[in-house]
Image (cartoon, helix red, strand yellow):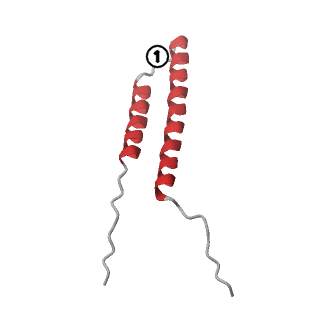
Amino acid sequence: MSEIKKEEINFEKEIKYLDLIYTDMIEALHQKPDENDIEGMRLYLDNIWGVFNRTVIRVNEIKNGLQKENKFKHETWNPPA
């Protein structure tokens, strides 16, 4: 019997991006100002939008990296009748 070797899957880049996303989100949540400070709330919301945009970009990079590494086959084999 032939032995099937399992490939080791390494997700170092993806874990790094997910750690960055987590850190950005936690820092953004802990910087919430007093609700009565209108200028502080405006700056807070601007910061939240920046974190959101970086998160979207990083998630897209993770997805593209996973798809590129797996080299999915998007074709079918249809034998003649």
Between 73 and 25, the residue placed more toward the observer is 73
Q: Quadrant of the C terminus?
A: bottom right
The image shows a total of numbered marks equal to: 1
Between 80 and 55, the residue placed more toward the observer is 80
Rendered position, 24 above or below 62:
above
Residue 30 in the image: state x and y as whole percent.
40, 25
Q: Quadrant of the N terminus?
A: bottom left
Farthest residue in the bottom direction?
A: 81
Residue 10 in the image: state x and y as whole percent.
35, 53
Between 50 and 39, the residue placed more toward the observer is 50
Name the residue: 44% across, 26% down: 28
For label 1, the crowd category at 10 Å Cα-Cα, with few meaning under 14, some 14 to 19 and many 20 or more, is few
The amino acid type, in three-letter code, at marker 1 is: Asp
Name the residue: 64% across, 82% down: 79
Name the residue: 51% across, 23% down: 47
Rendered position, 28 above or below 79:
above
Rendered position, 52 above or below 13:
above
Between 35 and 46, the residue placed more toward the observer is 46
45 displayed left or right of 2: right
Name the residue: 55% across, 27% down: 49
For residue 17, what is the image quadrant? top left
For residue 21, what is the image quadrant? top left
* Residue pointed to by mark 1: 34
Residue 9 in the image: state x and y as whole percent.
36, 57
- The secondary structure type at the circle numbered 1 is loop
Residue 69 in the image: state x and y as whole percent.
46, 54
Farthest residue in the right direction?
A: 81
6 displayed left or right of 53: left
